[in-house]
Image (cartoon, grey):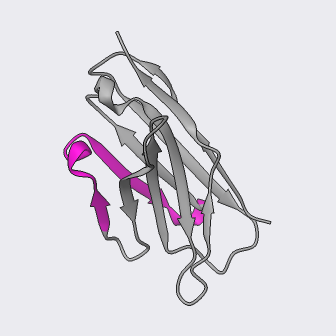
Amino acid sequence: QVQVVESGGGLVQPGGSLRLSCAASGSMFGINVMGWYRQVAGNQRELVATSTRGGSTIYADSVKGRFTISRDDAKNTVYLHMNNLKPEDTAVYYCKIEEPHPWSQEYWGQGTQVFVSA
């Protein structure tokens, strides 16, 4: 059984910073893509940032220059460093772990709330 656990969310003022962490454990055929998504109630879940084992990263336009994704493959952990946070960054942030091809199984965490408000 695979577990994916996020942490690091909370309340922060506009302009502030937070670091989210996500650790995966359990039986997997390795990890390729590790990513962060976010969702506001009533809206679809959207991509924030992803990172492949090969070093490629993708960011949503809304977070480019403010958020940085990093990973520690030895610890099966991915981080999201969020700077200059804005009220519109308020959401539940979810971590997704994806096995490499051909297995490509995806695993999601339970989410961590980020609330940006003065």
Residue drawn at (49%, 41%) of the image:
93
Residue drawn at (75%, 72%) of the image:
27
Task: Answer with left or right where residue 92 lies relative to residue 80.
Answer: right
- Examine the rendered structure and indicate whether residue 57 appears above or below residue 68: below
Image coords of residue 76 (percent x, y) = 59, 62
Q: Seen from this angle, which residue lies furthest right?
A: 1
Image coords of residue 106 (percent x, y) = 59, 69
Image coords of residue 74 (percent x, y) = 58, 65
Quadrant for the N terminus in the image: bottom right
The image quarter containing residue 31 is bottom right
Front residue of 19 and 97: 97
- Examine the rendered structure and indicate whether residue 8 appears above or below residue 95: above
Residue drawn at (65%, 59%) of the image:
24
Image coords of residue 62 (percent x, y) = 23, 44
Residue 104 in sight: yes
Which region of the structure is painted magenta? 57-75
Residue drawn at (61%, 77%) of the image:
30
* Magenta stretch encompasses residue 98: no
Q: Seen from this angle, which residue lies furthest top?
A: 118
- Examine the rendered structure and indicate whether residue 4 appears above or below residue 6: below
